[in-house]
Amino acid sequence: MNPALSYRQAFNTILKRDLKIALRHRDDIVNPLLFFIIVITLFAISVGAMPNVLMTIAPGVIWVAALLSTLLSLERLFKNDYQDGSLEQLLLSPCPVFILVLAKIVAHWLVTSLPLILLAPLLAMMMNLHPDGYLALFLTLLLGTPILSLLGAIGVALTVALKKGGVLLSLLILPLYIPVLILATAAVEAATMNSPYQGHLAIIAALFFASLITAPFAVGAALKVSTN
Amino acid sequence: MNPALSYRQAFNTILKRDLKIALRHRDDIVNPLLFFIIVITLFAISVGAMPNVLMTIAPGVIWVAALLSTLLSLERLFKNDYQDGSLEQLLLSPCPVFILVLAKIVAHWLVTSLPLILLAPLLAMMMNLHPDGYLALFLTLLLGTPILSLLGAIGVALTVALKKGGVLLSLLILPLYIPVLILATAAVEAATMNSPYQGHLAIIAALFFASLITAPFAVGAALKVSTN
Amino acid sequence: MWKWLHPYANPEVAYQFTGKLIPWFNGIAFILLSIGLFLGLAYSPADYQQGETVRIFYIHVPAAILSMGLYFAMAIAGLSALVWQLKLAHAAIAAIAPVGAAFTAIALITGAAWGKPMWGTWWIWDARLTSELILLFLYFGVIALGNAFEDKSQGAKAVSVLALVGVVNLPIIHYSVEWWNTLHQGATVTKFAAPSMAMSMYIPFVICFFGCAFLAGSLICKRFQGQVLARNSLRPWVKQLALAEDN
Amino acid sequence: MLNASNLTCIREERILFDALDLDFQPGDIWQIAGANGTGKTSLLRILAGLMEPENGEVCYQQTAIQKCAEEYHQDLLYLGHSPGVKSELTVLENLKFNLQLCSQDTEQCEKLLEQVDLFGFADTLAAHLSAGQHRRIALARLWLTQAKIWILDEPFTAIDKLGVKRLEQRILEHADQGGIVILTTHQDLSLPKSRYQTLTLERIFS
Amino acid sequence: MLNASNLTCIREERILFDALDLDFQPGDIWQIAGANGTGKTSLLRILAGLMEPENGEVCYQQTAIQKCAEEYHQDLLYLGHSPGVKSELTVLENLKFNLQLCSQDTEQCEKLLEQVDLFGFADTLAAHLSAGQHRRIALARLWLTQAKIWILDEPFTAIDKLGVKRLEQRILEHADQGGIVILTTHQDLSLPKSRYQTLTLERIFS
Ligand code: HEM
Ligand SMILES: Nc1ncnc2c1ncn2[C@@H]1O[C@H](COP(=O)(O)OP(=O)(O)OP(=O)(O)O)[C@@H](O)[C@H]1O
Ligand SMILES: Nc1ncnc2c1ncn2[C@@H]1O[C@H](COP(=O)(O)OP(=O)(O)OP(=O)(O)O)[C@@H](O)[C@H]1O
Ligand SMILES: [Mg+2]
Ligand SMILES: [Mg+2]
């Protein structure tokens, strides 16, 4: 019998494979990013030449765009793997499932959310966000988007085997997303008004750690149910 | 040899099948609708308790939401058929391809856009849209969403065989969508200010007929290229 | 405790046990609700600030608290379904979800009706209201997910996971009034140490609350029975039951 | 009736076949054989008009198939690796749709179900069938079609022995009525040797 | 080593099998036979722990497989209808990923490629392979795995004759080294009759 893979190695193997597929596919990276840009530009276009209106709605628009683009990219997280049978193979691997799942989620976040976070300041500029809000926007995105990925993964895992997965997915995870959205926009708005937003940030951070610790297990359990 | 199907019958057969699948799946109907509602509610939540701000951005938000939800539902138009081999079978059917394509597009519009149009007034109310804008909103949606479906179909047909279809799709069709978006929001805004908007509407109608006549042929040609 | 519980983990025993509970629950709920509502709606004093509208309180708060409590109960059922593979817990989840959703809806509607005179608007996007709305969506999600699976037990397991995850929303609802400054009233009845409220209001409230709780219990038992039957339709005792019904 | 001249197919810079001349006459059964990746599927797709050859052309009744697409498609039945069965529809609905596209009345369904051994599954979603049953839905078309030319890519995949026997019988019957059958399979056909011809594609090392 | 007791499987209210007792010993080759839709795939999935039976349990070395998931998965190789080949990766990348998950060094790849007859396709995307070649990538795992229990669902699908022969040899070799092979196939195995046992599932009419 060959030596069992260390957890670290297993994590790395999956992470690398997923990143490679994403880079090959490119879609996975460019799509959410493009979607993010599109939503924001379309708003800028359609709300038009009212800079002060734009300014007030900027934190909301940017965060909603980020949330939507995460939501849409989520389906890919397990769908392809489910269809071509890789998911079964992962579940049958000797490693604990939660490690593999975590690797997949991290890869997903790196591919979909990180570029988006890096691009956000530019779009914030387009949306006329108040300069004091930049740091808050960056921090909330940095802490908030992983929560979206982690919680979303649970929803995807639950619905991956269902033909009518899509709707359910939104129905299942949006309720879980809304608190993050409210907290984050509140934080950015507070920042633009120069009031303290550390409290909001602390709650977001707490949510992040809580979901980081629990979500992989929930996803593992959900995947087992789905492939049954 | 059995008598060839009349074009009418062929159209009906495909239309009925697609509608049946959509009703069975339900996803296809509820998903874009839910997405539409979600986008609007998320905005309402994140822009928050500023009714007058909501009011000014209402036409834009509603149209952007409609556009996005069409954009997202488009991929389904040919994707499933491509994967399970039905598309090949359709291309091999004795009927001219453009008829089958038209049937599929009509089914798609009925399933995704119609419910959305019917629901729009309710959401307009939530968004505090000025009462004078309702009729204009309804008319622009009624004429505008078919354009979105028709043009979108060309993009989907071109990218259906590509693994990395999604990005391309948005890139290909968004430039075509933006004029419709600008015209439509301008029309609704004009209506809320009680100025005439028939001019805008006429241009949208012209665009609609032009795309109705040309798009099915373009889609047919694109599909043949894709399955090669 | 397991030894004591074990016999009730048998579907047939559980079915009969809940069957015996229903009439009791019904009776208690009826008595408590009639007393409580009489005291609350007719007898207790009108509030010096809020006037007669304060009487919505006797429906609104029990419904709101139960909406959360039932969700918690559902989550516990989910946990036992996942950890101990308890098949009855599947039926319990399916039984609780719609009842919980109904109480959530009642809390929302009565809250909105109360909000109009108090705050001048039916709805605002504030934290407590939004999170209660989210709770309703969570219930919908649970119901829809359960229905989406053709395979009942597979669906139940999926639902268990979701119910557990959704529990995070409960503290958010409860503490939202402290974390955010909102229009909504802070904790008054649920401060255990010293309810900051007149006894003439507190007692009818408590009676109403337990009345609602027993009503919920009876509804849930009824639904639970149906679910147990549906999930065991191939078992002989169910067939016998059906035969007895026919005769 | 159907013939191909000078066909060349190149995929990924690999020559699969070169200057292939084929002539199919009514009553013929052709088995295209060859190892994996030698171009059987590619050849069938070219013959069906789904793919364009690098060179050469396929003619139906002396007309290039691109020119007489409508008639050719009327007379053609192609079943590929993925056979166009809709998982979201039930077995019966799938069959009915196929019947309607051939403009036949939908009353034969019951009989058809029996023929492909799916009796009792009429109202099951295709997604809930086993691999073989799923393919059988597509194969049912062989019993209802009036097309003369059948192009079948590995029709026996996932089908059990009894099913294979029935299929072979149906194929023979069709050829006896003056049809043409072109198929690939990695199993041996149990038809009489004299009834079918084999074309073996070889791997060309370039 | 692996045994199942009292297995019952119900799908869509149809009883597929009932009170099935199985015992697999080192060196065994089992063919699960039966018509389409009799529950072969379902049985294999239950044995692999991917599906839960309605009743009964599967034990590996006297422990229920849910309880010793890690060891069992270490010793198990399952290949289903869709074999988990990533179309977006090249052949080589697919193989390497599989090797890494078994924590083996990735130098054997070249040899492996030859073994499954994909030499020269190393850098082709899996999406651009023929049906058979695509499956061969998954089958390559049979040559590199050190798992003792192989559960193979129709491993010969789309594979050409030479390929089937090689596979059978590999299966025999594995059994001779004390492994267990459980497979389904609709073709006849050309192994010596004495070397394998057959379990035939019947359709139960209820
Ligand atoms: C749609 C609007 C409303 C919703 C969704 C809502 C929701 C809730 C919820 C979920 C609770 C339970 C909180 C907990 O136990 O932690 C609650 C309690 C309560 N609500 Fe509302 N509410 C609404 C409107 C109102 C209005 C207008 C009033 C009166 C001004 C009101 C007064 C109260 C009071 C007094 C409590 C008890 C507080 C406690 O002791 O915790 N609510 N409400
Ligand atoms: N995903 C599913 N959901 C519900 N029922 C299913 C599902 N898959 C298969 N079934 C049912 O289970 C039965 C057995 O299916 P299974 O796949 O085990 O058959 P099989 O013996 O592998 O057949 P084949 O030889 O065609 O592969 C079928 O009759 C089918 O109706
Ligand atoms: N979609 C594709 N894109 C590019 N090349 C392809 C594609 N499909 C197949 N090929 C190449 O064409 C060659 C022949 O493929 P084809 O599918 O015709 O083989 P086949 O004889 O049907 O094999 P099998 O017996 O495995 O089905 C293969 O070597 C493959 O590399
Ligand atoms: Mg092939
Ligand atoms: Mg099978």
Image (spheres, coloured by chain):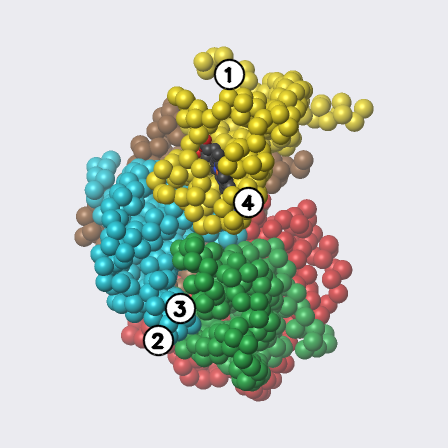
Chain colours: A cyan, B green, C yellow, D red, E brown
Residue at 42% from the left image edge and 74% from the top image edge: B174
Q: What residue is disc 3 on?
A: A43
Q: Kindly indicate whether the residue at mark 3 contacts the one at mark 2 (C-beta within 8 angstroms).
A: no
Front label number (4 vs 3):
4
**Considering only vertical position in the picture, is A226 above or below B71?**
above
Q: Kindly indicate whether the residue at mark 4 contacts the one at mark 2 (C-beta within 8 angstroms).
A: no
Real-space CA distance between mark 4 and mark 1, rounded to the nearest whole angstrom = 52 Å
**Image check: A117 left or right of B84?**
left
Q: Where in the figure is residue B121, as x and y percent of width and height? A: 58, 63
Q: What residue is disc 4 on?
A: C117
Q: Kindly indicate whether the residue at mark 1 contacts the one at mark 3 (C-beta within 8 angstroms).
A: no
Which of these two is toward me, A8 or A159? A159
Q: Kindly indicate whether the residue at mark 3 contacts the one at mark 4 (C-beta within 8 angstroms).
A: no
Of all chains, the one bearing label 1 is C
Of all chains, the one bearing label 2 is D
Residue D15 badge: 2
Tell me the SS state at disc 2.
strand
Front label number (2 vs 3):
3
Of all chains, the one bearing label 4 is C
Q: Quadrant of residue B209?
A: bottom right
Q: What residue is disc 1 on?
A: C6
Which of these two is toward me, D88 or D138? D88
Q: Is residue E30 visible?
A: no
Residue neighbourhood size for the residue with mark 1, other residues' Cα within 10 Å, grouped as few (<14), some (14–19), many (≥20)? few
**Considering only vertical position in the picture, is B135 above or below B208?**
above
**Considering only vertical position in the picture, is C14 above or below D188?**
above
